[in-house]
């Protein structure tokens, strides 16, 4: 059979029109029209090569997103960040401020983990949950290195608990907003089989970081990269 773009029908070789089956995303994508972009519904002009490429990439993200539990799994991760923040807040209120700080950062990592396991557990939870959520939200955009840099801004062992508490809260809010944006795109894709006509913005690692902490300070040429990576945000702001 062949597709008649004027009628939105599939024509058999004998000339009989068949109603397209929209039960699969691949079928809807193949015959998707201009949607909002061109003012036409399904059955309008075919997708351009660039639009097909976007759909192909997002289709891979869609499969991984749904297989990984989707929005519900990300929500669990956000709740875990909330639990970590609550533990930091509890330590501050109790006066047992031994989770982070300059003194903790001076210890060898192995010694710190053995001596102050509570702080190590919180740091590991924040890192693991954030990486998992970023991977689910960003899909193919996710880069391990950039994820680690974002986590370092959210929880810095050198900083006092009060600073880390506020940063973890801000990261949680930013991830929650990004998750909602991703889920809106997922629902649009499920309904239409394409992202053509979608007018929302997909989250990026940059947008998540900036929403949580503002734009990151650019390294001046006078400071070596290895030194810059060791600096806190406050130290970088001095340049």
Image: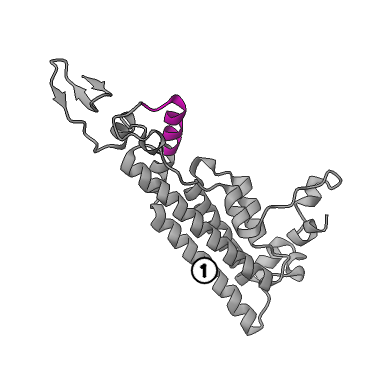
Q: Which residue is mark 1?
A: 82
Q: Residue at x 76, y 55 (%)?
A: 230
- In this rendering, would 128 be left or right of 75? right
Q: Note whether residue 144 is visible.
A: yes
Q: What kind of element bears circle 1?
A: helix
Q: Is residue 16 above or below residue 85?
A: above
Q: Nearer the viewer, residue 184 or 62?
A: 184
Name of the residue lying farthest toward the bottom: 94
**Could you say which quadrant of the image residue 74 lies in?**
bottom left
Q: Is residue 173 above or below residue 191?
A: below
**Image quadrant where one finds the N terminus:** top left
Q: Note whether residue 67 is visible.
A: no
Q: Is residue 149 above or below residue 15?
A: below
Local packing at callout 1 (Cα closer than 10 Å; few below 14, some 14-19, many 20+) is some
What scheme was used to colour the molecule? Answer: one colour
Residue 51 counted in the magenta span: yes
- In this rendering, would 146 be left or right of 177? right
Q: Position of residue 233 (x, y in %)?
A: 74, 59
Q: Nearer the viewer, residue 44 or 213?
A: 44
The magenta span reads 46-58
- In this rendering, would 125 be left or right of 48? right
Q: Position of residue 125 (x, y in %)?
A: 55, 62
Name of the residue lying farthest toward the front: 39
Name of the residue lying farthest toward the right: 222
Q: Nearer the viewer, residue 218 or 70?
A: 218
Q: Residue at x 45, y 44 (%)?
A: 199
Q: Residue at x 63, y 61 (%)?
A: 154
Residue 49 counted in the magenta span: yes
**Image quadrant where one finds the C terminus:** bottom right
Q: Main secondary structure of the magenta part?
A: helix
**Could you say which quadrant of the image residue 161 lies in?**
bottom right
Q: Position of residue 21 (x, y in %)?
A: 21, 34
């Amino acid at each position: 059979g062949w597709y008649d773009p004027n009628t939105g029908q599939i024509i058999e070789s004998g000339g009989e029109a068949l109603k397209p089956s929209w039960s699969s995303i691949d079928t809807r994508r193949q015959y998707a029209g201009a949607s909002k972009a061109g003012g036409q519904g399904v059955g309008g002009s075919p997708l351009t090569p660039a639009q097909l490429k976007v759909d192909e990439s997002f289709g891979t993200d869609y499969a991984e997103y749904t297989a990984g539990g989707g929005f519900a799994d990300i929500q669990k991760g956000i709740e875990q960040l909330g639990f970590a923040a609550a533990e930091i807040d509890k330590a501050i209120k109790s006066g047992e401020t031994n989770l982070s700080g300059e003194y903790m950062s001076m210890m060898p990592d192995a010694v710190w983990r053995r001596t102050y396991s509570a702080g190590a557990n919180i740091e590991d939870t924040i890192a693991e949950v954030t990486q998992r959520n970023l991977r689910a939200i960003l899909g193919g955009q996710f880069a391990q290195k950039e994820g680690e840099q974002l986590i370092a801004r959210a929880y810095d062992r050198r900083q006092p608990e009060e600073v880390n508490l506020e940063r973890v809260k801000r990261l949680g809010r930013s991830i929650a907003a990004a998750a909602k944006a991703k889920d809106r795109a997922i629902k649009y894709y499920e309904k239409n089989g394409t992202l053509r006509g979608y007018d929302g913005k997909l989250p990026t690692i940059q947008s998540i970081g900036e929403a949580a902490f503002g734009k990151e300070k650019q390294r001046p040429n006078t400071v070596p990269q290895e030194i810059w990576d060791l600096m806190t945000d406050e130290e970088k702001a001095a340049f």
